[in-house]
Image (spheres, rainbow, N blue to C red):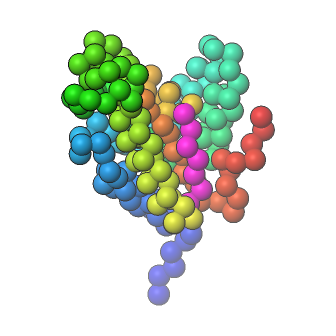
Amino acid sequence: MAVINENEMQYEALLDVAKQMILAARTAPKGRGVNNLGMSIITGNDIQELAKASRDIGQKEDYHIFERDAANVLNSAQAVVLIGTKIASLGLKVCGLCGFPDCVSKDKEPDFPCAFNTTDLGIAVGSAVSIAMDMRVDNRIMYTIGMAAQKMGLLGKDYKIVYGIPLSATSKNPFFDRKK
């Protein structure tokens, strides 16, 4: 008879959930079926580097929530799912959801997001965290961790808007009820 220790299987189970989250995000609906999303799973020492980058932003900008989230991720996350989007218009003749009359006009401002980029990202992130919720894995969507990942180029230089979703399996979700 083999005994599998909880700590041994917990990490593997979290990685399986993270992979399922990425699959759910990938298959989430996207405007015109165009994929502008990128995703990764961060583990081990890379979590430490990500937390350090978030802390550095907080110190540089004098904005404590980056430091708070960095400490939270460093102390509690066993994996972090990153989901980000490129900024690319869909080539629509009539739209205007981004504030420009059409994609040709929007493309003159290449750093201005297409409304579909952020909408698709939001749907994908929602699909991903729904998997974590279904599996009862502690998680929280963090723009702070996403910004640090974006500045580090963890998804690649083309991904301009990124969210980080730390994962943990504990008796109480460590990503809520945090100090302000």
Residue 132 drawn at (x, y percent): 50, 59
> Taking the image as drawn, is residue 156 in sight?
no
Does residue 112 appear left or right of residue 170 in this picture? Answer: left
At a point 46% along the width and 60% down the height, the residue shown is 131
Q: In the displayed image of the protein, which residue is found farthest to the bottom?
A: 1
Is 115 above or below relative to 3?
above
Front-lying residue, 89 or 68: 89
Residue 159 drawn at (x, y percent): 35, 28
Q: In which quarter of the image is residue 172?
A: bottom right
Residue 108 drawn at (x, y percent): 28, 12
At a point 35% along the width and 26% down the height, the residue shown is 96
Q: In which quarter of the image is residue 87?
A: top left
Q: What stretch is highlighted in magenta?
A: 137-143
Residue 142 drawn in magenta = yes
Q: In the displayed image of the protein, which residue is found farthest to the right?
A: 179
Is 26 above or below relative to 67?
below
Quadrant of the image for the C terminus? top right
Does residue 75 appear left or right of residue 124 in this picture? Answer: right
